[in-house]
Amino acid sequence: GAGVSQSPSNKVTEKGKDVELRCDPISGHTALYWYRQRLGQGLEFLIYFQGNSAPDKSGLPSDRFSAERTGESVSTLTIQRTQQEDSAVYLCASSSLGATYEQYFGPGTRLTVT
Amino acid sequence: RKEVEQDPGPFNVPEGATVAFNCTYSNSASQSFFWYRQDCRKEPKLLMSVYSSGNEDGRFTAQLNRASQYISLLIRDSKLSDSATYLCVVIVSGYALNFGKGTSLLVTP
Protein backbone atom coordinates (compact mmCIF):
# COMPACT_ATOMS: atom_id res chain seq x y z
CA GLY A 1 0.00 0.00 0.00
CA ALA A 2 0.93 3.67 -0.07
CA GLY A 3 3.58 4.85 2.33
CA VAL A 4 3.91 8.15 4.15
CA SER A 5 3.95 11.05 1.75
CA GLN A 6 5.17 14.58 2.35
CA SER A 7 4.96 17.77 0.39
CA PRO A 8 6.68 19.74 -0.85
CA SER A 9 9.82 17.68 -1.28
CA ASN A 10 11.92 20.85 -1.37
CA LYS A 11 11.16 24.34 -0.16
CA VAL A 12 13.36 27.41 -0.43
CA THR A 13 12.12 30.43 1.45
CA GLU A 14 13.38 33.80 2.53
CA LYS A 15 14.16 34.51 6.14
CA GLY A 16 11.10 35.87 7.91
CA LYS A 17 8.53 34.13 5.72
CA ASP A 18 6.11 31.48 7.00
CA VAL A 19 6.13 27.94 5.59
CA GLU A 20 3.71 25.06 5.81
CA LEU A 21 4.77 21.45 5.41
CA ARG A 22 2.32 18.64 4.83
CA CYS A 23 2.30 14.97 5.80
CA ASP A 24 -0.07 12.20 4.73
CA PRO A 25 0.39 9.18 7.01
CA ILE A 26 -0.21 5.56 6.15
CA SER A 27 -3.93 4.85 6.20
CA GLY A 28 -4.95 3.33 9.51
CA HIS A 29 -1.93 4.56 11.43
CA THR A 30 -3.18 6.45 14.43
CA ALA A 31 0.17 7.83 15.54
CA LEU A 32 1.99 10.58 13.64
CA TYR A 33 5.34 12.18 14.41
CA TRP A 34 7.38 15.08 13.13
CA TYR A 35 11.18 15.07 13.31
CA ARG A 36 13.86 17.46 12.13
CA GLN A 37 17.25 16.43 10.78
CA ARG A 38 19.86 19.13 10.37
CA LEU A 39 22.82 18.50 8.11
CA GLY A 40 25.17 16.02 9.72
CA GLN A 41 23.00 15.69 12.80
CA GLY A 42 20.68 13.08 14.22
CA LEU A 43 16.92 13.24 14.11
CA GLU A 44 15.27 15.55 16.63
CA PHE A 45 11.76 14.75 17.82
CA LEU A 46 9.39 17.67 17.36
CA ILE A 47 5.79 16.62 18.00
CA TYR A 48 3.59 13.55 18.35
CA PHE A 49 -0.10 13.04 17.60
CA GLN A 50 -2.08 10.03 18.77
CA GLY A 51 -5.71 9.79 17.76
CA ASN A 52 -7.79 12.50 19.39
CA SER A 53 -5.48 12.90 22.38
CA ALA A 54 -3.70 16.17 23.05
CA PRO A 55 -0.46 16.22 21.06
CA ASP A 56 2.93 16.00 22.73
CA LYS A 57 4.59 19.25 21.69
CA SER A 58 7.58 18.90 23.97
CA GLY A 59 10.10 18.80 21.12
CA LEU A 60 9.05 21.98 19.36
CA PRO A 61 12.07 24.30 19.52
CA SER A 62 10.20 27.60 19.76
CA ASP A 63 6.74 29.13 19.58
CA ARG A 64 7.35 29.81 15.90
CA PHE A 65 6.69 26.12 15.32
CA SER A 66 3.20 24.65 15.41
CA ALA A 67 1.48 21.60 14.01
CA GLU A 68 -2.04 20.40 13.47
CA ARG A 69 -3.61 17.12 12.57
CA THR A 70 -7.12 16.53 11.34
CA GLY A 71 -8.44 13.40 13.00
CA GLU A 72 -6.21 10.52 12.03
CA SER A 73 -5.20 11.89 8.67
CA VAL A 74 -3.19 14.75 7.27
CA SER A 75 -0.89 16.84 9.41
CA THR A 76 0.67 20.21 8.72
CA LEU A 77 3.75 21.64 10.37
CA THR A 78 3.93 25.43 10.24
CA ILE A 79 7.04 27.47 10.86
CA GLN A 80 6.44 31.19 11.25
CA ARG A 81 9.05 33.90 10.63
CA THR A 82 11.59 31.35 9.42
CA GLN A 83 15.22 31.71 10.46
CA GLN A 84 18.32 30.32 8.78
CA GLU A 85 18.77 27.81 11.59
CA ASP A 86 15.42 26.29 10.61
CA SER A 87 17.08 24.89 7.48
CA ALA A 88 16.84 21.13 7.74
CA VAL A 89 15.01 18.10 6.46
CA TYR A 90 11.64 17.76 8.17
CA LEU A 91 10.57 14.14 8.41
CA CYS A 92 7.13 12.83 9.18
CA ALA A 93 6.50 9.30 10.40
CA SER A 94 3.47 7.26 11.29
CA SER A 95 2.90 4.07 13.19
CA SER A 96 0.14 1.86 14.43
CA LEU A 97 -0.83 2.24 18.08
CA GLY A 98 0.52 -1.11 19.15
CA ALA A 99 3.90 -0.68 17.47
CA THR A 100 5.04 2.88 18.01
CA TYR A 101 8.66 1.75 17.79
CA GLU A 102 8.18 0.79 14.15
CA GLN A 103 7.79 4.15 12.58
CA TYR A 104 7.42 4.50 8.84
CA PHE A 105 9.02 7.65 7.58
CA GLY A 106 8.11 9.82 4.67
CA PRO A 107 10.78 11.07 2.25
CA GLY A 108 10.99 14.40 4.06
CA THR A 109 10.78 18.04 3.10
CA ARG A 110 14.13 19.74 2.61
CA LEU A 111 13.72 23.31 3.85
CA THR A 112 16.29 25.94 2.97
CA VAL A 113 15.97 29.40 4.49
CA THR A 114 18.00 32.02 2.67
CA ARG B 1 25.78 14.66 27.35
CA LYS B 2 23.84 13.26 24.40
CA GLU B 3 21.26 10.59 25.22
CA VAL B 4 22.45 8.31 22.45
CA GLU B 5 26.03 8.38 21.21
CA GLN B 6 27.56 6.65 18.25
CA ASP B 7 30.91 6.72 16.52
CA PRO B 8 30.11 8.58 13.28
CA GLY B 9 32.74 6.64 11.31
CA PRO B 10 32.98 6.29 8.41
CA PHE B 11 33.74 2.61 8.54
CA ASN B 12 35.25 1.57 5.23
CA VAL B 13 35.31 -2.21 4.83
CA PRO B 14 35.80 -4.58 1.90
CA GLU B 15 33.03 -6.84 0.69
CA GLY B 16 32.78 -9.96 2.77
CA ALA B 17 34.20 -8.38 5.90
CA THR B 18 32.59 -8.44 9.32
CA VAL B 19 31.96 -5.06 10.90
CA ALA B 20 30.58 -4.07 14.29
CA PHE B 21 29.13 -0.82 15.55
CA ASN B 22 28.50 0.19 19.13
CA CYS B 23 26.17 2.74 20.60
CA THR B 24 25.90 3.98 24.18
CA TYR B 25 22.90 5.49 25.91
CA SER B 26 22.82 7.66 28.98
CA ASN B 27 19.42 6.99 30.54
CA SER B 28 19.40 3.80 32.55
CA ALA B 29 15.58 3.83 32.48
CA SER B 30 15.59 3.33 28.73
CA GLN B 31 13.16 0.61 27.79
CA SER B 32 13.45 -0.27 24.14
CA PHE B 33 16.26 -0.32 21.64
CA PHE B 34 16.44 -0.52 17.87
CA TRP B 35 18.67 -0.12 14.87
CA TYR B 36 17.38 1.89 11.95
CA ARG B 37 19.09 2.22 8.60
CA GLN B 38 19.23 5.40 6.54
CA ASP B 39 20.47 5.41 2.98
CA CYS B 40 21.95 8.60 1.59
CA ARG B 41 19.26 11.28 1.27
CA LYS B 42 16.55 8.75 2.11
CA GLU B 43 14.28 8.28 5.09
CA PRO B 44 15.23 6.03 8.03
CA LYS B 45 13.83 2.50 8.06
CA LEU B 46 13.62 0.03 10.92
CA LEU B 47 16.35 -2.60 10.62
CA MET B 48 15.83 -4.63 13.76
CA SER B 49 14.93 -4.58 17.41
CA VAL B 50 17.54 -5.19 20.09
CA TYR B 51 17.01 -7.50 23.05
CA SER B 52 19.18 -8.45 26.01
CA SER B 53 19.16 -12.02 24.80
CA GLY B 54 20.46 -10.86 21.44
CA ASN B 55 18.72 -11.32 18.16
CA GLU B 56 19.83 -12.33 14.73
CA ASP B 57 18.37 -11.61 11.33
CA GLY B 58 20.37 -13.21 8.59
CA ARG B 59 23.77 -11.57 8.49
CA PHE B 60 22.81 -9.04 11.17
CA THR B 61 23.13 -9.60 14.91
CA ALA B 62 22.07 -7.07 17.53
CA GLN B 63 22.93 -7.18 21.21
CA LEU B 64 22.02 -5.14 24.26
CA ASN B 65 24.15 -4.81 27.38
CA ARG B 66 22.02 -3.08 30.00
CA ALA B 67 24.71 -3.10 32.67
CA SER B 68 27.10 -1.16 30.46
CA GLN B 69 24.34 0.70 28.63
CA TYR B 70 25.47 -0.11 25.17
CA ILE B 71 23.99 -1.64 22.06
CA SER B 72 25.86 -3.35 19.27
CA LEU B 73 25.20 -4.30 15.68
CA LEU B 74 27.30 -6.89 13.89
CA ILE B 75 27.17 -7.32 10.14
CA ARG B 76 28.75 -10.46 8.70
CA ASP B 77 29.76 -11.02 5.08
CA SER B 78 29.24 -7.34 4.18
CA LYS B 79 27.58 -6.55 0.86
CA LEU B 80 27.90 -3.42 -1.21
CA SER B 81 24.21 -2.80 -0.53
CA ASP B 82 24.92 -2.59 3.21
CA SER B 83 26.49 0.82 2.63
CA ALA B 84 24.35 3.23 4.61
CA THR B 85 24.15 5.09 7.90
CA TYR B 86 23.08 2.95 10.84
CA LEU B 87 21.08 4.78 13.49
CA CYS B 88 20.92 3.62 17.06
CA VAL B 89 17.50 4.33 18.55
CA VAL B 90 16.39 4.30 22.18
CA ILE B 91 12.95 4.74 23.69
CA VAL B 92 12.98 5.92 27.29
CA SER B 93 9.23 5.83 27.67
CA GLY B 94 6.20 6.12 25.47
CA TYR B 95 6.72 6.71 21.83
CA ALA B 96 9.42 9.29 21.15
CA LEU B 97 12.41 7.72 19.45
CA ASN B 98 15.78 9.10 20.54
CA PHE B 99 18.14 8.79 17.61
CA GLY B 100 21.89 8.72 17.62
CA LYS B 101 23.62 10.67 14.88
CA GLY B 102 24.40 7.45 13.10
CA THR B 103 27.43 5.47 12.01
CA SER B 104 28.34 5.61 8.35
CA LEU B 105 29.34 2.36 6.64
CA LEU B 106 30.89 2.11 3.21
CA VAL B 107 31.44 -1.36 1.79
CA THR B 108 33.90 -1.37 -1.07
CA PRO B 109 34.43 -3.94 -3.86
Image: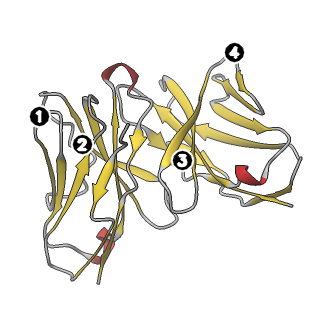
Could you say where residue A40 lies in the image, as x and y percent from the top left? 52, 65
**In which chain is the residue bearing label 3?**
B
Q: Which mark is residue B53?
A: 4
- Residue, disc 1: A71
Q: Residue furthest front?
A: A1
Q: Quadrant of residue A17?
A: bottom left
- Give the structural element (helix, strand or loop) at label 3: loop
Residue type highlighted by circle 4? Ser
Name the quarter where the C terminus of chain B is drawn: bottom right
Under mark 3, the amino acid is Gly
**Is residue B28 visible from the viewing direction of this image?**
no
Q: Are marks 4 and 2 on the same chain?
A: no
**Dot 3 corresponds to which residue?**
B100
Horizontal side, residue A28 vs residue B38: left or right: left
What SS does tag 2 mark? Answer: loop
Distance (Cα) linking label 3 and label 1: 31 Å
**Do circles 3 and 1 both sit on a common chain?**
no
Above or below B96: residue B105: below
At horizontal 17% and vertical 52% (from top left) the residue drawn is A76
Q: For residue B68, which numbered disc appears in the image?
A: none
Q: Where does residue B12 sit, x and y in percent of width and height?
A: 80, 60
Chain hosting mark 4: B
Front residue (pair B51, B46): B46
**Contact flag, marks 4 and 3 (Cβ < 8 Å):** no
Q: Given the image, on which type of amino acid does mark 2 rest?
A: Ser
- Asked if the residue under mark 2 is in contact with the one under mark 4, i.e. CB atoms within 8 Å, the reply is no
CA distance for labels 4 and 3: 22 Å
Q: Going by the image, does A71 lie left or right of A38?
A: left
